[in-house]
Image (spheres, grey):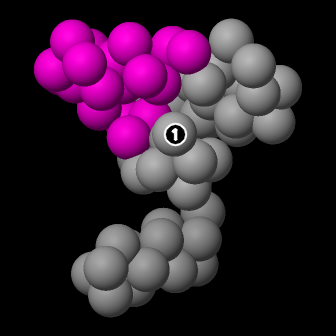
Amino acid sequence: MACQEVVELLNDYREDVLDAHRRARLDAHLAECPYCVSYLEQLLLATRLSSRLQVHDVPELVMASLLEVFRAR
């Protein structure tokens, strides 16, 4: 499995919704790729930290920029 494919599947991996075959392939890749492990750790940290934010904690300009990026996707 290539790193790009891993990156594309990490949210599903984190949410435990991958089928057994893909999960096994991804686990095998993570066992040998410190870069993807680091990326996964960063994703998990960002998820934990952002879940602590309250709407009033985010400055108005930052919120507007984030919403613009999300809408563009």
Q: Is residue 5 left or right of residue 29?
A: left
x and y, in percent, of residue 10 in the image: 44, 35
Q: Residue at x 51, y 14 (%)?
A: 27
Q: Is residue 63 visible?
A: yes
Instruction: Identify whether 8 is placed above or below 51.
Output: below
Q: Which is nearer the eye, 6 or 72?
A: 6
Q: Residue 14: say if magenta.
A: yes
Is the stretch drawn in magenta largely helix, strand or loop?
A: helix
Q: Quadrant of residue 28?
A: top right
Q: Residues within 10 Å of mark 1 (few under 14, many from 20)?
A: few
Q: Is residue 60 left or right of residue 34?
A: left
Instruction: Identify whether 7 is placed above or below 51.
Output: below
Q: Please report the bounds of the magenta region as a residue range.
A: 9-28
x and y, in percent, of residue 67 in the image: 37, 74
x and y, in percent, of residue 56 in the image: 47, 47
Q: Residue at x 31, y 79 (%)?
A: 73
